[in-house]
Amino acid sequence: MECIDCKSKCNKLFAKLTKAELEILNNKKVCFSATKGTMLYLQNSLSTNIYCLHSGVVKLFVNVGNGNEQIMRMMRADEVFGFGAISASGRENVNAIVYENAQICSIDIEVFNSLAAKNASLYKNLYELYYEDQNSSHKAILFYTQYPVKQRVAYLVYHAYKKFGIDTNGYVNIQVKRNEFANLVGTATESLIRHLAEFRDEGVLKTKGRFVRILDLEKLKAYLAIR
């Protein structure tokens, strides 16, 4: 994938690079395909790369003991991750694993710093993305601690709809196992299934295996007081 032809430029991270700078980035980056289940990096590992996700889905999660995990985010195409490279510790605070087959570009932090020394927009854009990432996580934590399970389910479905869009059949364009869905909501799988059934009975959602379809967006938004 040629940087100069990349339409996303990872959420505009590299939008203000000159043609010459994009050529340098293109020659230095490493792009690769990764299949589902590929571990990209581990929690607390030293980080030397920033990643641009061009297709597929990457799951970010933390270890919480007893072999359990807490899912933090699902990254979609065109998003940037691997912010440990710019943190004070230089270590990643999450694990990253490929959730759906992905195309990824990896940029060494030294290459990034070299370009940023000549084009300050890189640091500005990267830290804006980092702030948005942290702010999003903070808002999610507040929501999950202040609202009941049913509203959290509604929030997650709405957020997935806004982030991943819908497929040709009208279903939210990401397939998540029920236990992982429950993990994201912060509840037991049985509780999640019960609330999904309630939404189905209310004519708000339709489920089919791992797929979720929004039947009445306004009713769903009403649970979140979204206007």
Image (cartoon, rainbow, N blue to C red):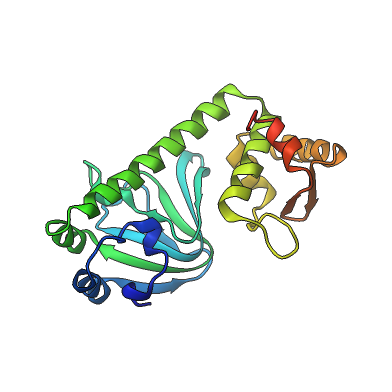
Report the side of 106 relative to 60 (left or right).
Answer: left
Residue nearest the viewer, comparing 52 with 101: 52
Q: Position of residue 38 (x, y in %)?
A: 47, 65
Q: Residue at x 72, y 55 (%)?
A: 210
Q: Residue at x 85, y 36 (%)?
A: 202
Residue nearest the viewer, comparing 4 with 139: 4
Q: Position of residue 143 (x, y in %)?
A: 55, 28
Q: Position of residue 140 (x, y in %)?
A: 51, 34
How many labels, in total?
Answer: 0
- Asked if residue 28 is positioned above or below residue 114 in the image, the reply reads below
Q: Quadrant of the C terminus?
A: top right
Q: Residue at x 79, y 41 (%)?
A: 204
Q: Quadrant of the N terminus?
A: bottom left
Report the side of 10 relative to 76 (left or right).
Answer: left
Q: Residue furthest right?
A: 201
- Asked if residue 2 is positioned above or below residue 177 in the image, the reply reads below
Where is residue 221, by image quadrant? top right
Where is residue 168, by image quadrant? bottom right
Q: Residue at x 30, y 61 (%)?
A: 14
Residue nearest the viewer, comparing 67 with 148: 148
- Asked if residue 31 is positioned above or below residue 58 in the image, the reply reads below
Q: Position of residue 217 (x, y in %)?
A: 73, 42
Report the side of 94 relative to 69 (left or right).
Answer: left
